Amino acid sequence: MQTITEISRWIRDYGHDPRHIQHLSSVPFDWHQLWTALNTIDDVELAIHSYLEGEFPAGPGEQYLRLYGVFQALFVQQDAMRHFIEIIRPGTPFVLADVLRDVREARNASVGHPTEVQRKGEVSAHGISRSTIGRDGFLLMSFSDKGGSSFTNVPVLELIAKQRKEVVRVLLEVVKQLKADDEEHKGKFRGRSLKDCFRLVTYAFEKISANLRGKDLLGAWGAGELQSSLTMFEKMLNERGLTIETYDSIKYYYAEIEYPLAELQKFFAKQASDIASAKAAIVYANALRGWFSELMDIAQEIDEEYEKSETS
């Protein structure tokens, strides 16, 4: 069975993928709360591991601190789970499983509000029987305002195990839903290649080069085709809910391309340009060729990502 840490690692990779960052970070506070919640879930795992693997103290003072700490950690993890799901799967209610209610009730009675617990019209007070404390659990003394009293075994290790199992189940369900959403999204665009936006780019550069060497008159068309390919690429990104800002690499190459392409278009249109001669224009065209090549590689990588199935 996968561990909480392993599932958390997958979710972190998902959330920081450029295709998802833009959506998840659209509300800054939600973005920070999302990762605070997941960090807290992971941090509690560290606390639980320390409780389970560390030497259990012999003195009652340290024993109480261990019990207070582990129950508060479990309580905090449940709250973090609820907030995490509310953000990453908006509209999906977090239904508290019975085992998690058991953990909360044990925490409230023993270390949360032991001197007064109000539930179903009854008020009760509770105390841990010091002589029964052990790593695996303890006896809880309870007194009701109705006059009854009782001793209840609180199986700490069992409650920890049940909560960890439930957290894994819930996180795996989230992962399953995220994969299904991604698969549905990708399915809409399979067969619609982003790289196809650049299918005439090589031919356009051939015409630009030939024009600048005096062997063709289609340089202006070639420069225009380069601009058209960029416009089409941006349009297809937008259809997928993406922009040129989504990927830092795309944003970088668009910025590098903008100036030399604009100057090359002016040059072919015989307008005032920073390009002084055909020889200088060749330098501009060669630089553009390299940047377009990088952009086409990125488009192919995105196409390959969209061909992958997310349901496995």
Image: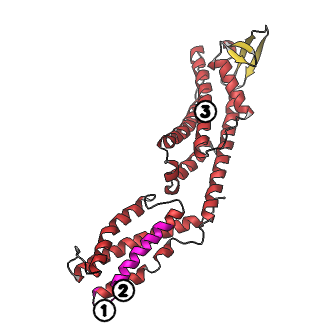
Element carrying mark 1: loop
Residue where numbered disc 1 is placed: 215
Q: Is residue 128 visible?
A: no
Marks 1 and 3, how far apart at CA: 71 Å
Q: Does residue 197 lie above or below 155 as drawn?
A: below
Q: Amino acid under label 1?
A: Lys
Q: Quadrant of the C terminus?
A: bottom right
Rendered location of residue 196, percent (x, y): 50, 75
Tell me the tag on residue 271: none
Element carrying mark 2: helix
Tell me the tag on residue 207: 2
Rendered location of residue 251, percent (x, y): 39, 61
Q: Which residues are magenta?
A: 212-235
Question: Which of these two is toward me, 17 or 106?
Answer: 17
Residue where numbered disc 3 is placed: 79
Dot placed on the residue nearer the N-terminal end, 3 or 2: 3
Q: Residues within 10 Å of mark 1 (few under 14, many from 20)?
A: few
Mark 3 or 2, which is nearer the eye?
2
Which residue ends up furthest to the top in the rendered image? 147
